[in-house]
Structures are given as structure tokens and as C-alpha cells.
Amino acid sequence: MKSNSAEHLLEMKNVKIEGFSDRRWHDIVNGIDLKLKRGEILGIIGESGAGKSTIGIAAMGYCKAGCRFKPGSSVVFDGLELTSASEEEKRRLRGARIAYVAQSAAAAFNPAHKIIDQFSESVVQHGVGSREEAYADAKDLYSKIKMPEPDTIGFRYPHQVSGGQLQRAMTAMALSCRPDLIIFDEPTTALDVTTQIEVLATIRDIVELFNTAAIYISHDLAVVAQMADNIIVLRYGDLVEEAETRTMLDYPKEDYTKSLWAVRTFEKTTVAGSRDSEPIVKVSHVTAQYPKTKEPVLFDVDFEVYPRETVAIVGESGSGKSTAARVITGLLPPLEGSIMLDGEILPSDYHNRTKEQLKSAQMIYQMADTAINPRHKIRKIVGRPLSFYLGMEGDEKQRRLNELMDMIEMDPKLYLDRYPAELSGGQKQRICIARALAADPKFIICDEITSALDQLVAEGILRLLDRLQQELNLAYMFITHDLATVRAIADRVIVMLQGRIVEQGEKNMVLQPPHHEYTELLLSSVPEMNPDWMDRIMAERTSGKGMQSAGN
Amino acid sequence: MTHILKMLAQRILLGLLTLFAISLIIFLAVSMLPGDAAEAILGQAATPETVAALRKQLGLDLPPHIRYLDWLGGILQGDFGTSIGNGREINEVLGTRVYNTIFLALFAASIAVPLALFCGILAALYRNSLYDRTVNVVTLSSISTPEFFVAYILLLLISVKAGWLPSLSNVRLDTTFAEHLEKTLLPALVLTLVSMAHMMRMTRAAIINLLANAYIEMAALKGMKRFRIIVHHALPNAWAPIVNVVVINLAYLIVGVIVVEVVFVYPGLGQYLVDAVQRRDMPVVQACCLIFAATYVLLNLIADILSILTNPRLLHPK
């Protein structure tokens, strides 16, 4: 079935794709060329909206609902022109010779079927083998990629397996028919760093083991640097730059590429207020538990935040970071311990707090989309706390609205009467910041506020928060799993693991060795902009240094 | 499994509690109606003395709570009491009536449910096509037409003009099963027509609702055929809403068929109720209402159980 006649396994020429929305066609991809040989890995880098995923699945001759190839596009896979092939021809290729690994395995696995049945589905349906053969192969693959309990884990349903394991199971699933090409679409973006490194290792092992060609799509350069032989950079559907990985890292030519490389240079320069004064927030020996869980999710958590200070809380998902925020805001009354704000002990349930107490501590969320009402105009979203907490109306409110919009660097004339859907992701997050500021708070909790944003946009948000802190004497509690963000903005760092604080102190103290062993694991798992980084780390880990990820 | 059994026990207990509350409501509602059986039986001949005497004989002069407890006590022992209208044990009649009603309901359901699911799946597969529009128009028209009208149209076409099926569904105790099927086919078709639209449209909507999910796109990118994507990937996740609508329609087939039973003169529970209301035969009215209520409670219980059984998250917890 496989022919070796074509020099390239995949050849995309002048690929143009358009999508239909708002009653007209928009260009998404404007003429991309790329070539891929057997066994080669191509990295595609770009920010959201660059058209990376669209290009990725276009390699399978597939367009998302509402999108189509424009005339003149050519996608040739192993001699077959996919843009003109029949649906049936393409269907036979998909899953069998070109496989896809999605960003979120939790969403891409069908919740109604066992993992191993989803593995064997392609094998049986494409007539590659029997169900029994597929089962045996799945178990073999699961053990090759070192999944725990390889013989039985496949017989679980997707919700019974952790996110990292699912992502690895999906990589194995892509291999079920031994395809020639696998498209990896941001396969580790949703994972914690400690889990990410394990999945990356799995992908690399598999690609090497079976000599599979791959397209690796990511916004994270350091990750792609570990995986790809060549890299292309996309922006707004255009090809910006193309080069061999090391060349691309060491000598980027285009300004845009350089700006991507330079993203992680922002560092808070200003010095935090001294710790001599009274803390603005004091969390004392808090133990907390959700009503339906058997065990507490926070154990004896104890820390302080001083005025003009940014305290970053880092940890993997499930470490209790967000629960700590819920306790402080009174959404989850603790079992033991107390919260002190500005010198007074707060009632543990927010229902019993006064308006003055409520307005002093505000919150900004990860998903701006879900945190603001899509049917309210910006004026109403930001204006609501002004009238609710401060009783402002009329001209006074309008003046304050203008001030707030100026603070977040958005033109009030232009934006106050728009709806959230008319704003970009970064602008929506700025609106959330303005809403928090409208209450005139002393303390703001930022829960993963930059993790859904592109790096350049995220950096803008961090700079804004830094400037506002200086101007308004704010204290921040910054919840994040991203250590680059911590390096950029924090004064102090708290490391959490399984509901406990394992280490806390000044940023430099926590981030410089010697570390607590878990901090060490976290720090060493952050990919570096160096193609050899992963080989080194994996070698160190297999030689017995370090500890295993908390997730496993 | 233990948590499911626990949940099941909980639901059954709640169901019994609901039934108890309903029995109270039925009893109170019936007592509040003007007039009683004594007046109805005596009719024109009623004088205050004869009415009082008959009330005493029927036990209608006792205080309401005593009558309620008597009634409830009887039901708990499986005795629905005596019909005031003809003095017969309600149990004697009730058994065949319930059997007839359930027979018709199951017969109608065995046509309507598979047909609705099939049409719904096809409508989801070929959505916005001519087929989709046609099946929507037809089912919606039939649900929007009063059921007695549908019944008379079918009667006219199938039994009067074509003469294929009998126009009366007068089954008796000695009617054979095959005869029973033949005599109830027409009412079953009417019920199918009036109940199908709801189930069909829910099946279509529940499936289409899921088509935007990542796992559906994943199935397409795994090279699965369209039919398989709908049936194997979307449908298993769409069961919960579909099952709920199907069960509500089953309840309707049992409880809501009064008009159809009257049109076809079918001796089911609905007609029994209508006759009893005309005669002010309160024990019969109460018995029928309670059975209808129990039907709803039981079918909702079944819907809950099926929703659990079709949801792997509930069936196989972490």
C-alpha cells in the first residue's frame, strides 16, 4: 500500500483556506507551502489566530465546519491530491495513514467508550486488524510508553484517567494503525509542566521507534525546539520564517520571530514595599474542605501579603492554589484558621461580609470570556461595581469610567459602548482588570489570568498590572502554574503541593538553589530554549535524581 | 454498584413519599367537589332523609380523616375499595382495565419509540436536507392536530373506506392476543402519530447538540463513516435527554389516552375514569388517579435509572 515513489511524504503548495462567519468569507490561511519527508518532524509555531491548527488538519485534507480550501491549493500526501480527492478516499487515509492528536485529550476522547475500544476502533474500521490484535497491540504500546498498569488501564473510561495519562493514551491511539504521519496539535498545552515533560518524552520515543513523520503544532517555542527538525513560524495565516531548528533558535531573521524569542525578558524592576508595615492579608493556619470530599484539600496554609507586594502561588493542578483563593474571598469557609484583611478578621462566609470588606479584595479570573457577561456593554460591566460599592451615578460615574479605561490603556470613547465579543482576548482581560479596579480594592487575586493568552499579550497584561501596583499601592496574589510568569512578576513565591505549602519566601531565595525537592522538580521541568534540554533532563531523571511528578 | 443501589433505594423512597402526598391531594380534591355519591345515586328521588340514610350506609358520614385512613389502609393491603356506582369490588374491574391500557400503551410505544429514534437519527445525519424538513413537517403537523381528529381521519380512511381494520376496539376477557393486536392497531397508530414528533425531535436535537464536541471531530479525523459517528459516537452520549422524553411520552401513552379510548370504545383505564366521574363514583376516581400518579412516579424512576446506566461517569466512578 505504501509507495516510496514520491520524494516527500507530504507536500502542501499555496494552501489557502477561508472560513465563513458574519455572513462573509474570511481568509484564514494565505498561501502556505511546506514539505515533509518520511520520519521528519516539522514544528509549526504561532500565536492564536495564526492558522496553525487549520494548517495542521489541512494536511489531512480536512477543514473545520464552515471552512474550505480556496482554488489553487494543493495538498499532496504520498502521491494523492487531497483537495480534489473524494470524501471516501480521504476517509480511508484518516486514522489509518495520517493520525491526529488533539490539544485536549479529555475533550477528544469519547466519554461513552473505554479507552482501549477507542484505540481499536480505527484498526477494526480501517480493516487493519482484528479487535483482539488491536487490544494486544494497545497493551504493548501502553507498556512501551511506560503507562502505569498497561494491561488494564485501557479498560477504563476516559474520566477515570488523569489528564496526562489520557494525553499519552491519545498519542498511543494515533499510532494504532501505524500511520506515516501524525499531526500533534498543541498536545501538551493543557498539562502541568511536570506532566508535560513525560508526554513529550512519550511522543519523542514513539516517533523515533516507528520512524513516523510528524507535524508538531505549538505556541511554545521551547517545547517545539525539543521536538522538531525544522520549524516554520506563522502569523495571521502567513508564513513568516522557515529554518532548521538550531538555526531558527540561534539566528532568527525576522523581527516577529525575534519578538517571540524575546518574550520572556520582562521582569518586575521595582522593589516591593517593605515588610515592616502591617500585612494587608494574613491567612492563618487555614484548613479547608469541599462539602462533598472526604479529606481536606488545604492543610494548615499560612501566609501573608503586604501592601505593594506580589505573592505568586505556584503548583500543579489539584495543589490547592485556587481553593486558597476561594477561602480568602469567602466562597469556601475554612474548617479551621482565619483570614485577616487590613487588620480585621473577616467573617469566613462572604454573605456575612460588609460591602467595605468585599470591595477591598477583588478577583480576576483565567477565562475572561466566562467571567464577563457577553450581553452587557463594557460600560455596564465596569460601571456595576462603581454604583454597587461606591454609589456613583451620572457624571461622576462617567468620569470614573473614563479614568479606569485610561488606566488599562483602552480608549473610553472607542470601547465603552462595545460588547465583549467585539474585543480580543487580551482586551477582555483588561476589562476584567478595570472591573476589579473599579471597586477601589487594596488586594487583587489574579487566578491564572495570563495562561489563556498569547505570550506577547500576556506580557502586556503583566506590565499593566505592575504599573498599576506602583500607582495604586495594590497588593497581588498571583495564582499560576507558569514559572516564567512567576519570574516576571513575583516578589515572593509560595510553592504548593497537594494542599500544603512546601516552600515560601522571597523570589530569589525560592528560585535559586538549594530548593525543596518538589520546587526543583517544577523548575527543572520548564522547557528551555535549547534543543538538548530534554535529553539532558531525561538522562538525569532516569539516573535516579529528582522525584516523580505529584500527578502520578 | 453499591452507590447505584443506594441511589435507587433513595429514589424509590422518594417515589413512595410522593405517592403518599398525591393520595392526600387526590382525597382532599375529591372531598372538595360539590355533591357526593349519595346524591348522585338518588338523583331526583333525593330527600334530605334518604340522602342521610344512604350516606350512613356508604360510610360517607364519617369524618374525612377516618375515611382517608380507611382508604389508605385498604390500598396498602391491595384493596381499592368498592365502587359506589355498582357495588362491585374495584379490584375486579381494575385489573383488566389496567392490563388493557398498558397493552395499548406498550403496543403504541413499540411502534413509536423505534420509529422516532430511527427518524431522529436519520434527521440528525441528513440535517437540513429535504428528508429532515419533511419528517419535521409531518410529525409536527400530526402532534399539532387534536388526537380525536387524527383518530377520526384514520378511522375514515383505514376502516370505513379501505376496511382493513375494525373501527371498534371492543376487546373482552376472552379476546385472543392476536385479535387484541388487530383491534388495537388503529388506536396504537393514532397514539404513534401524536407522540412521535416529540421523541423524534429530541433525538435529533440531542445528537446535533453533541456534534460540535471535540470527540466528534476526532472521530471524523480517525476516518470514521458519518453514520458510525452519529450512532457510535454521538448517540451514546445523547441517551439521557432522549430517555427522559421517551419515558414522559410513555407516561402520556398510559395516562393521556382517555380521548382515544373513548373514540375507539376501548375498555381501558381512561374510560373507566370518565364513566366514574359521570357517576360521582369517588372510590373509582381515586383509584384511577392514584394509578395514574404511580405510573408517572414509576416511569420517572425508570428514566433516572436509565440515565445512570447510560452515563459512564455515574456508572463507573473514579
Image: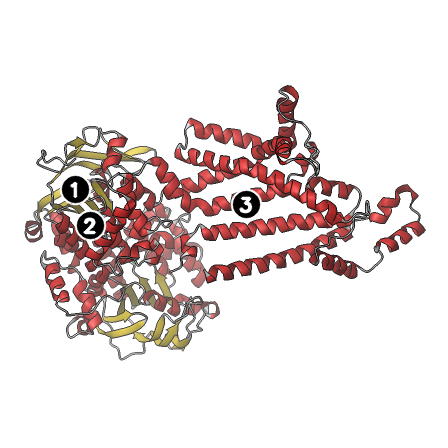
Q: Residue furthest bottom?
A: A276
CA gap, disc 2 to disc 3? 47 Å
Residue drawn 12% across and 57% down? A529
The reply to whether dot 1 and dot 3 touch (C-beta < 8 Å) is no
Residue at label 2?
Answer: A218
- Side (left or right) of B230 relative to A515: right
How many residues crowd mark 1 within 10 Å: few (<14), some (14–19), many (20+)?
Answer: many
Residue drawn 39% across and 43% down? B234
Up-down: is A539 above or below A8? Answer: below
Q: Quadrant of residue A492?
A: bottom left
Up-down: is A366 above or below A3? Answer: below
The reply to whether dot 1 and dot 2 touch (C-beta < 8 Å) is no
Chain bearing tag 1 is A
The figure's colour scheme reads: secondary structure
Chain bearing tag 2 is A
Which residue type does callout 1 highlight?
Asp
In the rendered image, which quarter contains the N terminus of chain B? Answer: bottom left
Which residue type does callout 3 highlight?
Val
Q: Quadrant of residue A551?
A: bottom left
Secondary element under disc 3, as helix, strand or loop, is: helix
Q: Position of residue B12 (x, y in %)?
A: 57, 58
Q: Residue furthest top?
A: B161
Residue A283 visible to an observer of this rendering? yes
In the rendered image, which quarter contains the C terminus of chain B? Answer: bottom left
Q: Position of residue A453 (x, y in %)?
A: 26, 53
Residue drawn 88% across and 43% down? B43
Q: Position of residue A380 (x, y in %)?
A: 41, 52
CA gap, disc 1 to disc 3? 48 Å
Residue at label 3?
Answer: B247
Residue at label 1?
Answer: A180
Which one is nearer the viewer's eye here, A277 or A548? A548
Which residue type does callout 2 highlight?
Ser
